[in-house]
Each structure stands twice: as structure tokens, then as C-alpha cells.
Image (cartoon, rainbow, N blue to C red):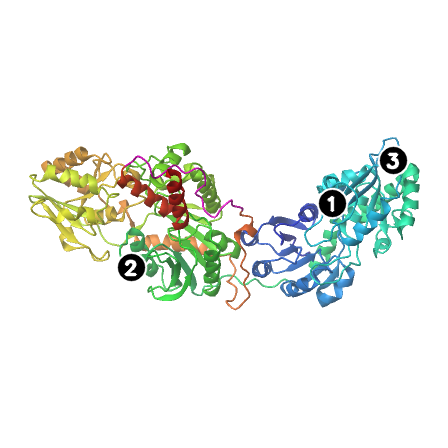
């Protein structure tokens, strides 16, 4: 029976790899190989997801001395077979040998290093890349541009040789020499301008230089920065690349094994000393036919035996004999689910998200071990806590840097989160809130192969102003506003410089691209995100799942007694329409209506409890979400008059379930969920008159109230049992092909996100630039407000410097 074809994950283990072109050539050769059904070259962030989704059965790691052991161990487990091709032996042999335990086979570029790997070691020289280097030799009728070409790092032995021979070559020779150096090497000492030596070239241009030069000089590397051996037995890739480029190479005969790849005198020219080089070089330059015969022979040899197609064939011939290990998939055993959130109910001052998660953790069932990861949002905000399902602390992490919503990334917070995922053996992360956390935590989970979901409970992913209230204290209109308007708003409200919003959104777009599941509570919030972010529009797994309330029948009621009882359920805040209510209440003081407020009331609205001023207002105070007050059941109408576009609104669902007719502002989820004159009434946002008219309409029309009650059904809201089944199904589908987490005792590598390909100018999305004076002609109160905004956005240090600069200017 023919073995199944290869499904390969190829991974360059060195992020900034000058030899990455070789990895690209390997990729091309794998794509051309008849036994390869699938191949993808992965990066650190998508390697695990590709390996899982594409059911890869062979992991090929390229280069080895900087590899991430945690990631490679996971990829090896997922794919079942793993090989490593190292390119820096013997110079990095000690590191490569340590990493060899992760792989089934080690292909080394150096023959003398094979024994160090034991039975796993296989010698495999590098090669030439047909994509970059294959150029037929120039015919004798076409003139060459250079007599001598050399490109290579200024290792001491190379510098010594070049200093010697350049003094004696004919003056009419045109030489092209690249001799880049690094801080660890001595000066080269060549009597040539630095500008003519310190340059690098692409693989394609290297091949062109070779092709148009009479001679290409190859000198061995004799140097090691890591304490290993100073020279290799096997020639470097340049030997094969130059041959494939149609050139003639002169190689120092100390470079061993050259004659195993090319025939000396026929396909390559060896020399033993400076004098020997000068004599043979002169012969090649002066005899074009002789030079071309060698070039043609070397080119043919390289095309037939020394391309990456040849090397890939050798790898796969060996890999087919590796016994495929059974991949340990997720079992039906209890799985660990981590909720990342900003708050928990026991800390107080909570809202719908905390209530939802408190209900969901129990409804998911015994198969799920639910943990919470929440920041400390008090004081200096320098810690985060892992909590059990019952909110008992399991672990806490302390950071030197205080949290700021300006942060996109923070290395110590990423390190802590990686430890949480590793030590708690987390199977799935669901991000419910990023306030208090850096969004780069998504990259940590992606790199570790932990599946993720994000639920948009507000608009923090869209803007720093998570409720989209502008500097004018009204809904900004997003997404139907320009980025310039966003800049204007952020400057006037927070003194955040122009261009910051674009920088923030570019980062968040990539965050959403790396989340496995995006969840929105309503179509409105989904569309808001999608119109701003291409990653949301194009996401393959996007769901609209309304936030549930406990299961229960809709309570049916009819008629009402005077006065009409109107409930305000939930918190009374500015964003929830507190100012609108404050301005409307005096106009309704003599109306046959009675207002009942259930929940927290912000300090500026404490006067609502004053019965002398508000005789028809009753403030009941806070209540337990899972035990709604009995007095609420006596109410006929509820008010939900937020001035921001809510993403769902749990209290609307709770009111409907009790048979209460809602009056809502026609904005966001409220406007989407309520059908005007069918199951509730809609009023214009921030409009006292519209609200007053709607209240009088219901007070004067008992039949209309009954009609709206009849329009209420359980189809209007989500219930906990169905919702938990839906979200559980999403989790299970993503986990179906995922590997079990690695053991908590295994080694873990902490890789900064800059080594994962995430390049940022700053950890903060708030751009620098000229800051307008915050101390000027405006009132002292206005100055204090601006100073506070600047401090909250930028911290103590920049604020003190700003003040010092302004004082200095005024003097």
C-alpha cells in the first residue's frame, strides 16, 4: 500500500534570518515534489493553526540555533513527525544538539557534525535555488563586466587574503567586492573606500554579479562567536549558488569536500596560496573559452545534482521512514476555559458582562473548568489575577508598569499570560474585555496554539472611548465618521495627538485576524466593527450570539392601575441617559406616573431619591441580578434611554420576560431589538420631549399598552440554556482538532512579540507630536480638566515634563 502523501508545515525558526531565501527555495521545491499534497511556510503566529487545520503530518524546521523550543515541541506533537535542517554547524553545534531532542531527524550542513546527533544525524549540504540563482553562462560573444567578484562577511582570514592579493592584481581589472562586517570582528584593513565594501546584495543580484564576472572568489570562514569550531568541513551554499549562476569559482583548497561536489580543474578551480591564485586567475581572465568551458560544466552539474529539489528529495526519502506518532488530541475529559475580563461581581460596580459570565460559568456544565483572568483596576493597576470558578485567587502577577489603555503591548504582561496558559494547561481563551489588559495577549495565545474567542461587549475594540461618546458628550456617529473626526475628538477629549486612532486600529485589525472566533451580541455591533475592520469583514468564523438571561416563561399581564408604574432597571449613569431623565422628571412631576429605580445610581443623580423634589420617584437601590425585586413585577413600563449604542442590554431582556413594555432610544442594539409600536416604543436619543410624549402616550392608551404586551414573546431574547449550548458547540468545534496542552512541567520559551513579526514604533498607540499648551487663557477649571486628561493618557513623567516646559516658556 502506497503511504499517504506529505502534508508539510515548513517553519523558519529564526525570525530575522539572512538565509530566509533558502527557506523560500525549500518551499518552492516542496511544492514541486510529487509526493507532497500540501505545504505551507508558517510564521510563529499561524504555525499552530495551520498545522491543526491542514492536518499536517510532517514538520520541517529550518535553521536551529534560535528556535522557540515550546512552539517547536507543540508543532512536532501536532504533526507527528519532525525534522530539523540546521545551517550553522559547526559554529552553533552545541545549541543545535540541545534542541535535537525535539526532532526525529537532524539534517546538518556540516559532515563533521553528524556524529554529534547520534542516530538522528544526517549530512545534507545546502544548495542553489533555481528561483534565485539559475542563470545560464554568458556566451563568449557577450562581454563580462568584472574580472573579479567577491561577496562575504569580513572574517579575519578573508580580510588578510584580500589585503594581499589586491596589491598585485593588474590595474586594469575591474573588481566588485562586498565585505560587510559586524561589531565582533576586527577591522578589515583594506585600502579601499568603505562605501565600496560595506554593501549587501540580494540572492538574485548575487547571481547576476557572478554571471557577469570572469572569476568569483570563494574563501572559507574561519571564525566562531559561540566558542565552537572555527571552520566547517562542508562548503557553504555560495559554492552551489555561484555554479548555478553560470560563473567560474576559484576556491581555496583548505575548504574541504569541494571536490565531492565539483570536479577540480573542470567545474571549479582550486588554489593554495596568494601567488597560485594570481596565476590561475590571470589565466581565466585571459582565456574566455577556457573560462566558459568550466562555467558550462559547473552549471550543468549544479542543475542536475545541487538544487533544493535534490535536497528536498533526500529529506522526504528519510522522512518516509519515520514512524508517525499518534497525535494526542483533545479528549472528552474536562477542559480548561479561561475568561479574560475586566471585573468580577464580588468587586462591585459591575454591569452586564460580569452578570453574564457569572451565569455562563455554571451553565456550561461539569466538562468545563472555568477560570478567570482579571486585572486589579484600583490604585496603580499593576497586577493581574487568575481566579477559580468561585472567584478564589489561584495566582497573581505583579508588573512594574502601570496599566494604561494606551498600551498595545507589554512584555511583562505577555510573559505572565504565557505562564498562565502554560501552568494552568488552558485549552481555550475567551476574551470578554480588554480594559485592564493589553490586546497583544491574543498573539501569545496564537503563538502557543491555544484557541481563542472574542466577544464585543462594548466598542473598546473600535475606540478608546468604549461607549463612543464624543468630546461633545454625545454619540460620535461611528462608523459613519472620518478618521479626522476621530482625531479631533480624541484631541479635544484626551489630548491624544492626530494619527493615533489610525495606529490603534491598524493594530486591532491584526488582533482580530488572529482570533479564532468573533462573537457579537447584535447585528448592529457586528456591522459597526465590520465596517471599520477588514479582518472582521473577512473573518471565517463570525457569530451573532445574544447575551442570555435565565430561562423562564414570559409573564403575561394586562391593564394597569393609576399611576402608571415605570421602571428604570440597571445603573443610572450619564451614558444610560441620566441627564435626559434629570431634565424630563420635573416635566412629569404632576403626571399620573410613578418612576421606580432599581440598581446603582451615580452620585450626580443622588437627588432622585429626594421625595420633596421628586415626589413620584422611588429609588429601591441595588439588587441581585439573579433575584429581581418583587416591586419590579408591579411595573408596566421600563425605560432604556442610553445615549450610546449599546451592544445588547440585558435589562431589556429582563423587562420583556416580566411582560413589561419598554421605551428605548432608537440607537444601537436597543433600536435593533425593539420594533416600534409592536413590542415597545422607540424615542430619539437624548430627547426629553420624545421621551415625555412616549410616556404620556402609554399612560393615556391602555389598549396600546395591552397591544404592545401581546407583541412580547420569548423569541425576543436569548435564554441561558440555548445560549450555553451554542457557545459550547463553538468551543468544541474549535477544540475538536486541537492537541492537548503540553505538560505544565515542560520548558517554555518567552518570545517578545517583536520576534513574532509584530513591529511597532511604540508600545503605545498614542502618537507623539507637538502638544498644544494645556495652560493658557482658558479658565483654571478647564486647565485642570485638560491636565487630568493628559495625565490619564500619558502618565506622571510626561505630565511633569509638560508642566516644567510650560513654566519655563512662561518665564
- Residue 766 lies in magenta, yes or no? yes
Q: Position of residue 603 (x, y in %)?
A: 20, 49
User: Closer to us: mark 2 or mark 3?
Assistant: 3
Q: Which mark is residue 347?
A: 2
Question: Would residue 206 be found to the left or right of residue 446 on screen?
Answer: right
Q: Compared with residue 410, is residue 677 higher up or lower down, i.e. above or below?
A: above
Residue 526 can be seen in this image: no
Residue sitting at the far front: 811
Q: Main secondary structure of the magenta part?
A: loop
Q: How many marks?
A: 3
Q: Residues within 10 Å of mark 1 (few under 14, many from 20)?
A: many
Residue 618 can be seen in this image: yes
User: Closer to us: mark 1 or mark 2?
Assistant: 2
Q: Which residues are magenta?
A: 759-778
SS of the residue under disc 3: loop
- For marks 1 and 2, give the CA distance: 61 Å
Looking at the image, which is closer to me, 138 or 794? Answer: 794
Q: Position of residue 427 (x, y in %)?
A: 46, 60
Q: Residues within 10 Å of mark 3 (few under 14, many from 20)?
A: few
Q: Compared with residue 795, is residue 115 higher up or lower down, i.e. above or below?
A: below
Mark 1 lies on residue: 129
User: Closer to us: mark 1 or mark 3?
Assistant: 3
Mark 3 lies on residue: 172
Amino acid at each position: 500500500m502506497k503511504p499517504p502523501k506529505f502534508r508539510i508545515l515548513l517553519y523558519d525558526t529564526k525570525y530575522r534570518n539572512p538565509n530566509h531565501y533558502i527557506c523560500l527555495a525549500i518551499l518552492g521545491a516542496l511544492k514541486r515534489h510529487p509526493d507532497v499534497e500540501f505545504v505551507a511556510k508558517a510564521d510563529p503566529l499561524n504555525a499552530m493553526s495551520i498545522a491543526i487545520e491542514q492536518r499536517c503530518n510532517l514538520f520541517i524546521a529550518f535553521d536551529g540555533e534560535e528556535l522557540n523550543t515550546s512552539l517547536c515541541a507543540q508543532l512536532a506533537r501536532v504533526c507527528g513527525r519532525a525534522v530539523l535542517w540546521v545551517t550553522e554547524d559547526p559554529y552553533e553545534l552545541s545549541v543545535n544538539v540541545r534542541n535535537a531532542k525535539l526532532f526525529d531527524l537532524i539534517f546538518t550542513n556540516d559532515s563533521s557534525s553528524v556524529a554529534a546527533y547520534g542516530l538522528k544525524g544526517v549530512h545534507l549540504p545546502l544548495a542553489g535555488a533555481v528561483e534565485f540563482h539559475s542563470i545560464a553562462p554568458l556566451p563568449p560573444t557577450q562581454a563580462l563586466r568584472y574580472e573579479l567578484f567577491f561577496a562575504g562577511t569580513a572574517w579575519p582570514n578573508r580580510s588578510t587574503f584580500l589585503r594581499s592579493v589586491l596589491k598585485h592584481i593588474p590595474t586594469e581589472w575591474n573588481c566588485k567586492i562586498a565585505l560587510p562586517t559586524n561589531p565582533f570582528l576586527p577591522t578589515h584593513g583594506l585600502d579601499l573606500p568603505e562605501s565600496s565594501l560595506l554593501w549587501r546584495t540580494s540572492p538574485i543580484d548575487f547571481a547576476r554579479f557572478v554571471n557577469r564576472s570572469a572569476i568569483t572568489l570563494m574563501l572559507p570562514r574561519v571564525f566562531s562567536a559561540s566558542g565552537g569550531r572555527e571552520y566547517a568541513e562542508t562548503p557553504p551554499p555560495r559554492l552551489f549558488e555561484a555554479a548555478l549562476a553560470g560563473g567560474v569559482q576559484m576556491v581555496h583548497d583548505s575548504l574541504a569536500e569541494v571536490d565531492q561536489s565539483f570536479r577540480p580543474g573542470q567545474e571549479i578551480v582550486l588554489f593554495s596560496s596568494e601567488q597560485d591564485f594570481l596565476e590561475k586567475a590571470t589565466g581565466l581572465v585571459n582565456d574566455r573559452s577556457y573560462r566558459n568551458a568550466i562555467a558550462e560544466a559547473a552549471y550543468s552539474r549544479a542543475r542536475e545534482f545541487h538544487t533544493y529539489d535534490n535536497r528536498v528529495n533526500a529529506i522526504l526519502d528519510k522522512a518516509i521512514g519515520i514512524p508517525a506518532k499518534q497525535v494526542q488530541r483533545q479528549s472528552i475529559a474536562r477542559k480548561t476555559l479561561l475568561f479574560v475580563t475586566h471585573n468580577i461581581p464580588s468587586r462591585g460596580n459591575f454591569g452586564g458582562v460580569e452578570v453574564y459570565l457569572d451565569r455562563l460559568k455554571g451553565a456550561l456544565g461539569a466538562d468545563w473548568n472555568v477560570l478567570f483572568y482579571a486585572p486589579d483596576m484600583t490604585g496603580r493597576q499593576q497586577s493581574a489575577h487568575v481566579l477559580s470558578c468561585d472567584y478564589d485567587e489561584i495566582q497573581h502577577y505583579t508588573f512594574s508598569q502601570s496599566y494604561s489603555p494606551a498600551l498595545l503591548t507589554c512584555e511583562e504582561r505577555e510573559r505572565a499570560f504565557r505562564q498562565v496558559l502554560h501552568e494552568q494547561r488552558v485549552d481555550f481563551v475567551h476574551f470578554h474585555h480588554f480594559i485592564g489588559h493589553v490586546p497583544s495577549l491574543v498573539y501569545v495565545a496564537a503563538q502557543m496554539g491555544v484557541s481563542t474567542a472574542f466577544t464585543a461587549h462594548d466598542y473598546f475594540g473600535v475606540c478608546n472611548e468604549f461607549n463612543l461618546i464624543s468630546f461633545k458628550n454625545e454619540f460620535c456617529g461611528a462608523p459613519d465618521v472620518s478618521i479626522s473626526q476621530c482625531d479631533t475628538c480624541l484631541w479635544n477629549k484626551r489630548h491624544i495627538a492626530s494619527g493615533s486612532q489610525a495606529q490603534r486600529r491598524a493594530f486591532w485589525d491584526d488582533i482580530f485576524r488572529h482570533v479564532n472566533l468573533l462573537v457579537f451580541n447584535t447585528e448592529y455591533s457586528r456591522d459597526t466593527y465590520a465596517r471599520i475592520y477588514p479582518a472582521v469583514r473577512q473573518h471565517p468564523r463570525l457569530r451573532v450570539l445574544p447575551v442570555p438571561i435565565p430561562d423562564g416563561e414570559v409573564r403575561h399581564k394586562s391593564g394597569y392601575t393609576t399611576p402608571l408604574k415605570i421602571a428604570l432597571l440597571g445603573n443610572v449613569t450619564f451614558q444610560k441617559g441620566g441627564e435626559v431623565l434629570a431634565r424630563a422628571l420635573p416635566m412629569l412631576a404632576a403626571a399620573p406616573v410613578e418612576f421606580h429605580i432599581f440598581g446603582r445610581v451615580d452620585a450626580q443623580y443622588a437627588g432622585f431619591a429626594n421625595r420633596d423634589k421628586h415626589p413620584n420617584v422611588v429609588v429601591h437601590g441595588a439588587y441581585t441580578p439573579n433575584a429581581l425585586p418583587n416591586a419590579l413585577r408591579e411595573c408596566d413600563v421600563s425605560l432604556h434611554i442610553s445615549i450610546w449604542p449599546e451592544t445588547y442590554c440585558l435589562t431589556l431582556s429582563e423587562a420583556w420576560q416580566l411582560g413589561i413594555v419598554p421605551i428605548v432610544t432608537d440607537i444601537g442594539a436597543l433600536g435593533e431589538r425593539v420594533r416600534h409600536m409592536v413590542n415597545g416604543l422607540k424615542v430619539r436619543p437624548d430627547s426629553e420631549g420624545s421621551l415625555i410624549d412616549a410616556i404620556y402616550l402609554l399612560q393615556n392608551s391602555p389598549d396600546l399598552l395591552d397591544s404592545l404586551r401581546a407583541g412580547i414573546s420569548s423569541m425576543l431574547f436569548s435564554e441561558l440554556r440555548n445560549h450555553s449550548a451554542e457557545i459550547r458547540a463553538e468551543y468544541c468545534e474549535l477544540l475538536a482538532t486541537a492537541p492537548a496542552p503540553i505538560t505544565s512541567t515542560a520548558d517554555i520559551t518567552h518570545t517578545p512579540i517583536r520576534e513574532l513579526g509584530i513591529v511597532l514604533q511604540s508600545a503605545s498607540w498614542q502618537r507623539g507630536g507637538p502638544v498644544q499648551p494645556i495652560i493658557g487663557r482658558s479658565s483654571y477649571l478647564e486647565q485642570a480638566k485638560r491636565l487630568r486628561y493628559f495625565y490619564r493618557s500619558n502618565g506622571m513623567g510626561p505630565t511633569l515634563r509638560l508642566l516644567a516646559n510650560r513654566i519655563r516658556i512662561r518665564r
